[in-house]
Amino acid sequence: MKQLSSNRCFGGLQNQYEHASGVLNCTMQVSVYLPPAALQGNVVPVVYWLSGLTCTDQNFTTKAGAQRVAAELGVALVMPDTSPRGVGVADAPDAAYDLGLGAGFYVDATQGPWNSHYRMYSYTVDELPALVESALNLGPRRAICGHSMGGHGALTIALRNPSRYVSVSAFSPIVAPSQCPWGEKALTAYLGNDRSAWTVHDTVALIEAGAAQLPMLVDQGTADNFLEGQLKTPLLERVCKRKGYAATIRYQDGYDHSYYFISTFIEEHLRFHAQHLNAL
Ligand SMILES: N[C@@H](CCC(=O)N[C@@H](CSC=O)C(=O)NCC(=O)O)C(=O)O
């Protein structure tokens, strides 16, 4: 990994790196916060953060204000980009914000022209942790968290890989991409028309199918413009109740979809993850 920048932050370091990705077939950027404990030579656990539509590795890094609590708790934060990038990487024909660049949806595309680069599921689950954790001496204890499209990514990735993550949390996640316009558009493009291929990338469908329990926290703002049409949190509440899945799902009064919401509650999410990361 080539270091692009490094800034002292709450006694730790906020770094940005560039690396070649064999899985995505392009060069990627990733931001990493190293808490003071890591700089003192301790092997610290990691919270992976997955961002939403239009984001890069920089949105959460610069807007969420997560570093102060990560420093206190002694956890590293890893913030990847949301899609492959660069020359030859396909984008939506109309440069739409909800498909292509900035909108990888954390799936491995099987359909052209996306399938030569868009493999964000394998990148997030396998390639990135292997690279970052060995290069920076982090882990192996991990938690995963995300927002909106990234909340969908965090939930589906954790549900499919419960042995790799001790806990999962999400802000305003797309809980059922098979049942909303953002998800239907992206999953059709990346995975094709056969909806049976979509179910492993749909939180509600995974829980319906009996996914293993792991500690799960979800926060959703009541003033979020996307709640009714895209995020559909009640579908998650209903499937959890029906299947006896013990998730904590909270509605936060008056909060919208923005990083102001995330910055308000990120401390609670990091403390939730630290409780499980340190229990091992
Ligand atoms: N431009 C779009 C909406 C884009 C948007 O709100 N992106 C969110 C994530 S939405 C779900 O994945 C985001 O995180 N934006 C970056 C930020 O820094 O706020 C529209 O106008 O509808």
Image: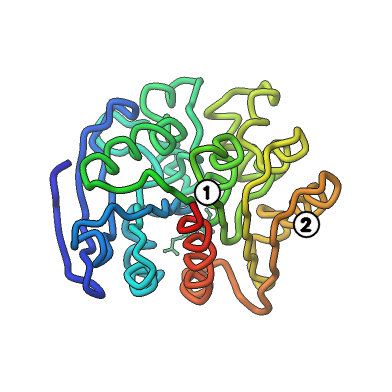
Image position of 24 (left or right of 184): left
Disc 2 from disc 1: Cα separation: 25 Å
Q: How many numbered discs sit on the rendered protein?
A: 2
Q: Which residue occupies 67% across, 31% down?
A: 199
The residue carrying mark 1 has its beta carbon less than 8 Å from ligand 1: no
Q: Which residue occupies 65% across, 79% down?
A: 254
Q: Which residue occupies 51% across, 57% down?
A: 279
Image position of 143 (left or right of 17): right
Q: Which residue is mark 2?
A: 234
Q: Please state the horizontal and vertical placement of residue 60, each as a whole percent of the image.
A: 39, 62
Q: Which residue occupies 55% across, 29% down?
A: 189
Image position of 165 (left or right of 197): left
Question: Is disc 2 placed on a helix, strand or loop?
Answer: helix
Question: Is disc 1 placed on a helix, strand or loop?
Answer: loop
Q: Please state the horizontal and vertical placement of residue 70, each as a whole percent of the image.
A: 37, 67
What is the three-letter code of the residue carrying label 2? Pro
Q: Which residue is mark 1?
A: 166
Classify the position of the N terminus by image quarter.
top left
